Image (cartoon, rainbow, N blue to C red):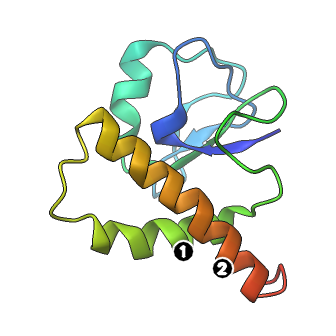
Amino acid sequence: MPVIDVSLAQPGMVLAANVLDKRGRVLIPAGKELIEKYVAALPAWGVTRIEVEGDEIEGVDADVEPWALDKATEELDTLFQKSNRGHPAIDALFDACVARRATQIQAAAGDHP
């Protein structure tokens, strides 16, 4: 099951694992279908990644490990901090940069964190 960045979450996707808050409390249980309300709330809850049912998600390399995505997101958050991430084009650019950087990070680490 793919683990995706919440920016790629869409209504209709089904969760393959519980969505937890930082304290480990269940926010949305596994098996639940995402609705617009949940998709909008995920970033506000501090959730950065979710596991969804199905095969590979467009825009996400299935071979990129979550730790590499997390590190790339952290690096690029700094670079994009003054950008308007609410603009669809900027957000799409950010996602593309994260995917590329995560691949580079993982390759440089030899697939190990």
Q: Which mark is residue 105?
A: 2
In the rendered view, tell whether residue 1 sits above or below residue 66.
above
The residue under the point 43% across, 23% down is 38
Q: Secondary structure at mark 2?
A: helix
Left of 84 or right of it: where is 57?
Answer: right
Q: Residue furthest bottom?
A: 109
The residue under the point 34% across, 67% down is 77
Name the spot of residue 99 as percent of width and height, x first.
60, 58
Q: Is residue 113 visible?
A: no
- Dot 2, crowdedness within 10 Å: few (<14), some or many (≥20)? many
Left of 81 or right of it: where is 109?
Answer: right
Q: Is residue 102 visible?
A: yes
Quadrant location of residue 100? bottom right
Name the spot of residue 72 as percent of width and height, x first.
52, 70
Quadrant location of residue 64? bottom right
Name the spot of residue 102 as percent of width and height, x first.
63, 68
Q: Secondary structure at mark 1?
A: helix
Q: Amino acid at mark 1?
A: Lys
Name the spot of residue 55 as percent of width and height, x first.
84, 31
- Tell me whether the residue at label 2 lies in contact with that at label 1, contact meaning CB atoms closer than 8 angstroms: yes
- State how many labels appear: 2
Closer to the camera in the image, 32 or 35: 35
Q: Real-space Cα distance between discs 2 and 1?
A: 8 Å
Question: Residue under circle 1?
Answer: 71
The residue under the point 45% across, 57% down is 22
Q: Amino acid at mark 2?
A: Ile
